[in-house]
Amino acid sequence: MMQVFVDVRDARWKKHKINFNKIANATDSCVYKDSEVSIILTDDVEIHEINKTYRNVDRPTNVLSFELGDDVLLGDIYISYDTVMREARDENISFEDHVAHMVVHGVYHLMGCDHITDDEAAIMEMKEIKALKKLGIKNPYADEMSNCKDGSCCPGGAIVAFLKRFVVRENSWVQYALYAVFGAIASFGFAPFYCWWATIIGIAGAYWLTVRNKNIGGFWHALKRVSPFGAVYAISMFWWTLHSIYVVPELTQQFAIWTVPALVGLGFAGVVIFSWPFVAIARVWTSSPARVFLFSGVWTLVLWGREWMLTGFPWNPLANIAMPWPMLANSMSLWGALGLTFIVAGLIAVMVELLRNPRIRANWYVLGIFALMLGVGVWHGNTNMQRADDGAAQAQTMMRIVQPGQSQSRKATHNRDQALQNARENLNNLVSLARSGAGDFEVVIFPETAYPFAVVPGDEIAIAGVIGAPMIMGANTIDEHGKIYNSMVLANSNGVVEHIYSKSHLVPFGEYRPLGFLPASIDLAQGRGPERIGFAGLLFVPAICYEIIFSDSLIPDGEGQIDAIVNITNDGWFGNTPGTYQHLDMVRRYAIESGLPIVRANYSGISAFVASDGVVVSALPVGAAGAIDGFVWGAHETLYRTIGRDWWMIIIMFFACVGAIVFARTREN
């Protein structure tokens, strides 16, 4: 029997119980029964160096054999854990079986076999197949595609085979439960979880459920079929909006009864909004590659439509799951959240179609198209990140952001005496935080509704004089007609109000009554719209609260230089829920799309200086009281801002329609 000596140089090999002696002796070892073989179990780093040194090949490989030309000491076999594991995964075979193949391959090399010519390769492969058969391992060279009816031998074939065997009866509770589960899973790709793979699995699962049965029925049946996905997806993503009901006791007493109806309303809105892409692919009869363009196009159209529904709520575009990858996220500087959403939705759809039937060549073409767009976006994203660094060394306006970090109940109470006492204490706290610490700042920025009194025409903001610096502060203002606004008030260092900007995108249920009769905690008037403001040496556009989530909505047409966006907000209503972190990601997305850095003052977190590539330069965490100083740089006009949201939507829809038409005639066999 051939003697086998094993040298383990990478500890990962120890996890696998592999009988190297048995494998090596499955070859024609009777000829070399008194021989010795050394097997060195290493990794890509070492085998790369050996390959470069002895073969002049500058890359790692799976196995290397060094024959000594001796009948007793046959030689050494080096096997890389990394490459073999990677190949095993790519080929959908077990790691142990692939290692066995590498050992047999290496031993035959030591015995003098080679595969330089076709004849030599045929002989060597025949020997390997025979040896592996003794070990119960199938032929690694066989082209079994024609015999693989269930797709189990293809990449990802185990999943394909399982899905084809998994029977879900139409209109069964299992079907609806799976849609609901996929909707819940899909919500975890966004902040603060960033489980991007969960969103991909959730949407892919719902897509698979939808296309697996071509006998869908009519429109209403298709809508009913996919409705659990839309309902649960919406509730899982937006439940935190109801947290606001329970922040202030007086509001809890008044609005707690609306909790269950609000959850039902969220679910119904989810059905109306998020079901359309799946209904489209269920009802439109077309080929699988054309279906990919249809799905991604409708998903993107739905996102664009969310800009306008009621006063709009385009929260958590699918593109936001890319936030953990800066270069990919910065592709939104090219085509915005709309374009990246189109690409992500298309990639999800085409991967499902390829798993269902990898033999449709057109699906591979479609995969190539979407992968190319992804690559172009990443390249442009890298360019945008470089542009965002311009001007960092230049002197800029130093700003101080103040974050009170107080609970919302500290601000809002219906007891007049307590409210006045809280207001005085809150003002003192704001002054104290603004004057805390060292630093030579030129303007102080307070968050939304930080000023505890209403501002009327002719008022002065006395605390600006106490602080001794110009001030930007959120407050409720009342005009000469008695209308109440949610405003950004700008006062100079003497406390004189120089400008007031009022919010135009109001929050339904929170700031106005939708349809005129649904409940809301307050009914505010609407501001005039976007403005460019020059103040304290800074040219900026203002945004109050969730106005920042509306793509391409803050910058007035025809304006010149803009240094930054100043966003004042109050996430105290939502506490330490996902909504607070998702709101910051919406700010980062807007910075990328517009090419403008953003100064964000939040009442209870997260206040931040955000660069024009979406990077959070500095921040105060949720619930923390304090102040941070900083300045902005790198403002530039992105291609997305130049073309504009609506024109990009037209381009995307044109591309989706052309793709769907071109591939509509693709044969399915």
Image (cartoon, rainbow, N blue to C red):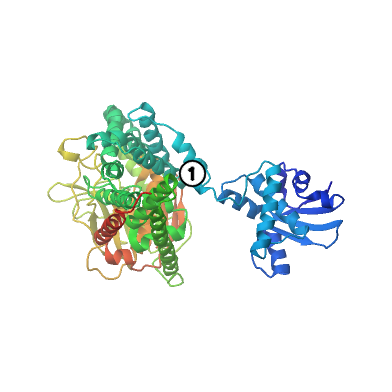
- Asked if residue 15 is positioned above or below residue 559 in the image, the reply reads above
Image side of residue 89 versus residue 198, left or right: right
Q: Amino acid at mark 1?
A: Gly
With 481 as the anchor, is 318 left or right in this view?
A: right
Residue 580 occupies which quadrant of the picture? top left
Pick whichever, 521 or 225, lies toward us. 225
Residue reaching furthest to the left: 481
Q: Secondary structure at mark 1?
A: loop
Q: Point out residue 3 in the picture as x, y percentages from the top left corner.
A: 84, 49
The quarter holding residue 186 reads: top left
Q: Nearer the viewer, residue 24 or 263?
A: 24
Residue occupying image coordinates x 26% and y 64%:
532
Image location (x, y in percent) of residue 253: 29, 27
Residue nearest the viewer, comparing 45 with 518: 45
Query: Residue at coordinates 39% horizontally, 60% vertically from top-left?
Result: 369
Write the residue at 65% across / 49% down.
98
Mark 1 neighbour class, 10 Å CA radius: few under 14, some 14 to 19, many 20 or more: many
Q: Position of residue 227 (x, y in %)?
A: 30, 35
Q: Compared to 410, does 491 lie above or below? A: below
**Residue 190 in sight:** no
The one of 487 and 208 positioned closer to us in this rendering: 208
Q: Which residue is mark 1?
A: 151
Decide: is 365 above or below 223: below
Residue at (46% x, 72% y) in the render: 393
Residue 15 image point, x, y percent: 70, 43
In this view of the protein, can residue 634 be seen by the observer?
A: yes
Total labels drawn: 1
